[in-house]
Image: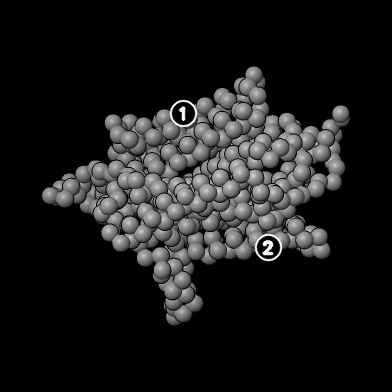
């Protein structure tokens, strides 16, 4: 393998400024939506006292899960010694941090009072005389996991870029790998520990979210990598593209496996989960459509066909499959987060609950433009930050041609 030269984007073309202007406009629309929701109240959204996590949470949790998976390329290169991926490691680290930043931004802006972001953690974590209270909350764990991820990956990136610290990068990469698994596990346990919701309350959600992160993160990584190299005229060889394509296929297949096991297990415990399973999978509603069409077909089966069909060019196949995985991931989060809330909680087992405010019935939910724009702003923030990082940091290899990345390549 030849010595890889890293450079930054020049950032002087009209296309660059047009892209940044579009991303700023998307972010601005999201901020305006957040301000409207903050000032007018959540009654201007589709959220209610039954559906308290709406479309912004779908985008936020998807991005948070994908952030862990985006670090996969760097982990495979450093932890598992696959040197062909090493030139992509800096971009992998930067993208993982920017995706997490986009997801957390949506989460913070949807809180209703984002100005309490600092004072609540400080008072609850640092000055609480009974620290066991927040240690018993999975949300308390995730505050530490998310902020710790940013710090650890930031140090990992610093050590990788500065020559005198590169000897420490291997040790930090192992720590980052373990931490990212903990981060995604913690995110999955947010739902796995919610025993009151029949759609959740399953330990398998933790490893399932870890596997989801592999697919979602690699999909976003591919959708950033290929356009960047096409638009900047840099060479991207077929060997690396085919490796990424095959890796995406493996992760998608593993995700489908966990989805099948999760749903079969819920059907097996019919006394508890038959109602919610029938509602989500076979009900005449948007959640069943999102599951079968969005998550299973578009996000699972079709990407596998595209990835492993030999007559489709590798680069096109990777882009198309990655786009479908993103759509499938958002569909999965929609079914899990919103569908899980729409089904009524079984507060009095064996009893029928009814009221004039539809207690005991299926909750209705229709997202509004404010929620969608806030969710899209998270993607805009992620893309703006990664493009800005490309412009100021030398994280892009000048060439990823086959002869430059593959030590066994013969011209």
Is residue 147 or residue 366 the one in the foreground? Answer: 366
Q: Which residue is the site of mark 2? A: 155
Residue 120 vs 269, above or below: the answer is below
On the image, the x and y values in percent for residue 169 come to 75, 58
Q: Which residue is the site of mark 1? A: 297
Q: Quadrant of residue 133?
A: bottom left
What is the secondary structure assignment of the residue under circle 2?
A: helix
On the image, the x and y values in percent for residue 258 come to 50, 38
Q: Quadrant of residue 403?
A: top right
On the image, the x and y values in percent for residue 209 come to 51, 46
What is the secondary structure assignment of the residue under circle 1?
A: helix
- Which of the two discs, 1 and 2, sits closer to the camera? 2
- Residue in the picture at 43% in, 33% down: 294
How dense is the environment of label 1, judged by Cα within 10 Å: few (below 14), some, or many (20 and up)?
Answer: some
| N-terminal label among 1 and 2 | 2
Q: Residue furthest top?
A: 311
């Amino acid at each position: 393998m030849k010595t890889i030269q890293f450079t930054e984007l020049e950032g002087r073309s009209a296309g660059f400024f047009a892209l940044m202007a579009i991303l700023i406009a998307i972010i601005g629309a999201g901020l305006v939506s957040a301000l409207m929701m903050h000032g007018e109240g959540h009654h201007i959204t589709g959220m209610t006292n039954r559906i308290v996590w709406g479309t912004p949470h779908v985008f936020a949790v998807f991005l948070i899960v994908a952030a862990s998976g985006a670090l996969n390329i760097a982990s495979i290169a450093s932890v598992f010694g696959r040197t062909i991926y090493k030139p992509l490691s800096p971009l992998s680290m930067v993208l993982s941090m920017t995706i997490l930043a986009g997801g957390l931004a949506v989460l913070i802006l949807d809180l209703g009072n984002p100005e309490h972001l600092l004072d609540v953690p400080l008072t609850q974590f640092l000055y609480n005389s009974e620290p066991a209270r927040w240690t018993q909350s999975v949300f308390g764990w995730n505050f530490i996991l998310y902020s710790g991820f940013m710090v650890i990956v930031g140090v990992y990136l610093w050590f990788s870029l500065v020559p005198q610290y590169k000897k420490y990068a291997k040790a930090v990469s192992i720590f980052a790998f373990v931490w990212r698994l903990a981060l995604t596990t913690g995110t999955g346990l947010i739902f796995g520990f919610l025993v009151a919701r029949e759609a959740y309350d399953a330990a398998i959600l933790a490893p399932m979210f870890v596997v989801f992160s592999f697919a979602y993160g690699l999909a976003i990584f591919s959708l950033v990598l290929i356009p960047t190299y096409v638009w900047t005229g840099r060479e991207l060889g077929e060997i690396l593209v085919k490796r990424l394509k095959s890796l995406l296929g493996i992760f998608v297949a593993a995700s489908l496996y966990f989805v099948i096991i999760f749903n079969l297990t819920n059907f097996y415990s019919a006394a508890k989960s038959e109602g919610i399973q029938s509602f989500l999978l076979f009900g005449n509603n948007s959640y069943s459509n999102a599951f079968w069409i969005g998550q299973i077909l578009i996000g699972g089966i079709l990407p596998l066909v595209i990835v492993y069909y030999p007559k489709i060019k590798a680069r096109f196949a990777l882009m198309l499959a990655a786009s479908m995985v993103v759509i499938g991931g958002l569909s999965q989060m929609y079914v899990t987060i919103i569908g899980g809330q729409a089904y009524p909680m079984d507060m009095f087992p064996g009893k029928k609950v009814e009221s004039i405010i539809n207690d005991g019935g299926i909750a209705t939910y229709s997202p509004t433009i404010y929620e969608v724009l806030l969710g899209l702003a998270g993607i805009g923030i992620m893309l703006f930050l990664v493009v800005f990082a490309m412009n100021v940091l030398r994280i892009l290899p000048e060439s990823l041609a086959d002869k430059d990345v593959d030590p066994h390549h013969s011209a």
